[in-house]
Image (tube, rainbow, N blue to C red):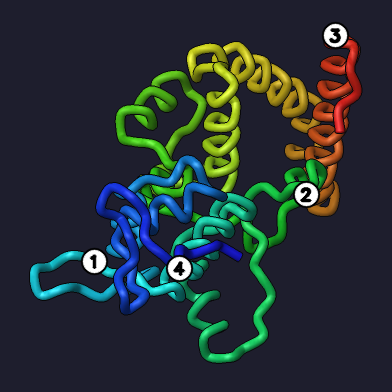
Amino acid sequence: MLRTPSGGAGHGTAATDSGLMSIGTVLNVLREEFPEVTISKIRFLESEGLIEPQRTPSGYRKFSADDVERLGHVLRMQRDHYLPLKVIREHLDAMERGEAVPLPAVGRQRDGEALLEPSEGSTAARIGRAELLAAAGIGEQELDEWESYGLVAPLPDGAYDAETVTVASLVVELGRSGIEPRHLRAMKAAADREAGLVDQVVAPLKRHRNPQTRAHAQARTKELAALTVKLHAALMQTALGVRLP
């Protein structure tokens, strides 16, 4: 649980006697768990209807402890489950109504194998550009750069799928260690070559006259993709002389 301040905080961000907090205080509280969060992101989540802070007569936002907890839930579901904001909002609203609802699984899970076999709903999940920016905690310029390198790409209708959210989150994580997007072009090129190899093997199944054989092509593609990922991990371990978790 996030720890909200019971007393004052310096630099004009203290909680008031009523227990309401300024956006600066909320930012400090959230950054204990979410160091990448910004005031702009908090405002964006408000504009998307995830929170509804009170307003002073002069228009300043004032957040309650419940608002901060709700923000924490939103950021946690984005970070750990990569859910679209619409899904998060529906989930939280259901919780407030007292409904026992399981957390939907969209995008990358902490278990590496879950990435290869997402749920049926996750493959169809889509989010808009603004939601992707908020989920990854990046700006327009950064996303444009990633797209120029081919790391991510929108669908024909301009939306992004769950896999793009996964890629974006990993690019951000690598960036924290100094690995910049331009360094990842080689990895993207290697992945494209590996995908091409899998497609080459599966192509005869896709063209087969037997419908059952064609249907088997998707299962075969997943199987080969999983083997490719395992091989890549093993080769990485060998090259670095370490064991991956």
Q: What element carries label 3?
A: helix
Helix, strand or loop at mark 4: loop
From the viewer's perspective, tell me whether residue 19 is left or right of residue 214: left
Query: Which mark is on residue 6?
Result: 4
Disc number at residue 185? none
Depth check, mark 3 against mark 4: the one in front is 4
Q: Is residue 192 above or below residue 19?
A: above
Report how far apart the C-alphas of labels 3 and 4 lie in the structure.
51 Å
Q: Distance of mark 3 from mark 1, alpha carbons?
A: 52 Å
Q: Which numbered circle lies on residue 61?
A: 1
Determine which residue is flagged by label 3: 239
- Tell me the crowding category of disc 3: few under 14, some 14 to 19, or many 20 or more residues within 10 angstroms, Cα based: few
Residue drawn 27% across and 69% down? 62
Which one is earlier in the sequence, the residue at label 3 or at label 4?
4
Mark 2 vs mark 4, CA separation in Å = 41 Å
Q: Is mark 1 on a helix, strand or loop?
A: strand
| Mark in the foreground, 2 or 1 | 1
What amino acid is labelled 4 in the image? Ser
Q: Please say if 121 is above or below 158.
A: below
Circle nearer the N terminus (3, 1): 1
**Tag 1–tag 4 contact (CB < 8 Å):** no
The amino acid at mark 2 is Ala
- Where is residue 167? Give x, y as percent: 57, 35
- The image quadrant where one finds the N terminus is bottom right
**Which element carries disc 2, helix, strand or loop?**
helix
